[in-house]
Image (tube, rainbow, N blue to C red):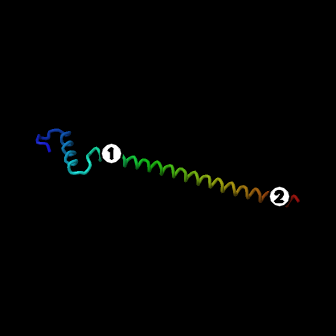
Amino acid sequence: MQDTPITTRQQVIDAVHDALDQRSRIDATTHADHHQFVGHLISRYQRRRELTDKVKQQVVGWGVILLLGGIGTAVYHYVANISQRIVH
């Protein structure tokens, strides 16, 4: 600990950091690095989730297109079959 009086805001901050560093198993720099790493993990998770949501939307969209295409094809074949029966 310091024996000199604390007179500035920065000295207070430094004194608190020193006290926490002495009490903690990790220092302030390592703690800040851990926060930065956790922030990186969170942003990575968010990007992955956005990608997953985008892929899900595309799969659903293509599923709807395929369904409508299948219905259209079935109607076409039905109409073609009926028109051949009428003509013959």
On the rendered structure, is 25 left or right of 38? left
Query: Mark 2 Cα within 10 Å, few/some/many (few <14, many 20+)?
Result: few
Distance from disc 1 to disc 2, alpha carbons, whole Å, reads 74 Å
Q: Nearer the viewer, residue 76 or 20?
A: 20
> Residue at left 18%, top 44%?
15
Measuring from the top left, give residue 42's x and y in whole percent: 40, 49
Q: Quadrant of the C terminus?
A: bottom right
Disc 2 marks which residue? 83
Disc 1 marks which residue? 33
Q: Which mark is residue 58?
A: none
On the rendered structure, is 7 left or right of 68? left
Q: Quadrant of the N terminus?
A: top left
Tag 2: amino acid? Ser
Which SS class for mark 2?
Answer: helix
Q: Nearer the viewer, residue 76 or 31?
A: 31
Measuring from the top left, give residue 50's x and y in whole percent: 49, 49
Tag 1: amino acid? Asp
> Residue at left 48%, top 50%?
48
On the rendered structure, is 2 left or right of 24? left
Which SS class for mark 1?
Answer: helix
